[in-house]
Amino acid sequence: MPREEGRKLIAQNKRARHDYHIEDTYEAGLVLTGTEVKSLRAGRANLTDGFAHIRDGEVWLEGVHIPEYTMGTWTNHAARRPRKLLLHRREIGKLIGATTESGRTIVPLSLYFKDGKAKVEIAVARGKRAYDKRQAIAKRDAEREMQRARAAQLRRR
């Protein structure tokens, strides 16, 4: 059987980029059961309510919804169980230092397969205030309007 190569995106947390200022990102492996891997290969996962925390020197991912595998039997997994993240001790130390400051949290940004192994991209993030979100939306809308104007101008030529 040929070995998988490259990166296959499973799920992305677009809400995290809207609700938080992303400061630092890390790539972590996941400890999964067989039915979780099969469900992920089917492209089913939801990172919206996910967060990570550090307990006893280990990083745990909570709130991520990986639905039960449809063809699974009694060996199926719980959809929102805590999952251990695999990181180097040095990276865990940096995360501990970053999250001890108030207002910072660890959020998952994306879940993907990299060379056949399930990975999650996590970020140290600081929550945005309501006016920051409004500014980001206004900036995005202004850029979209500029793109439309440029496209219309090119069509007229």
Image: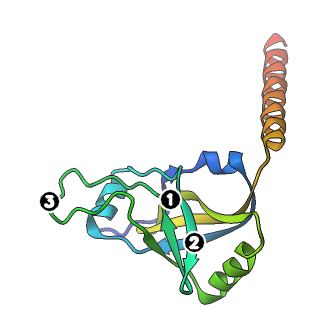
Tag nearer the camera, 2 or 1: 2
Disc 2 crowd, CA 10 A, few/some/many (<14, 14-19, 20+): some
- Classify the position of the C terminus by image quarter: top right
Tag nearer the camera, 1 or 3: 3
Q: Determine the residue positioned at 49% across, 74% down.
A: 29
Q: Determine the residue positioned at 80% across, 35% down.
A: 134
Q: Determine the residue positioned at 42% across, 68% down.
A: 82
Which residue bears the numbered disc 1? 111
Which residue bears the numbered disc 3? 73
Q: Earlier in the sequence, mark 3 or mark 2?
A: 2
The single residue placed furthest to the top in the displayed view is 156
Q: Earlier in the sequence, mark 2 or mark 1?
A: 2
Q: In the rendering, at what x and y percent does residue 100 appear?
A: 73, 76
How many numbered badges does the structure rendering display?
A: 3
Which residue bears the numbered disc 2? 53
Q: Amino acid at mark 2?
A: His
The residues bearing labels 2 and 1 have C-alpha atoms spaced at a distance of 17 Å
In the image, residue 69 sits, relative to residue 5, either above or below, namely: above
Q: In the rendering, at what x and y percent does residue 121 appear?
A: 58, 64
Q: In the rendering, at what x and y percent does residue 92 appear?
A: 63, 82
- Classify the position of the N terminus by image quarter: bottom left
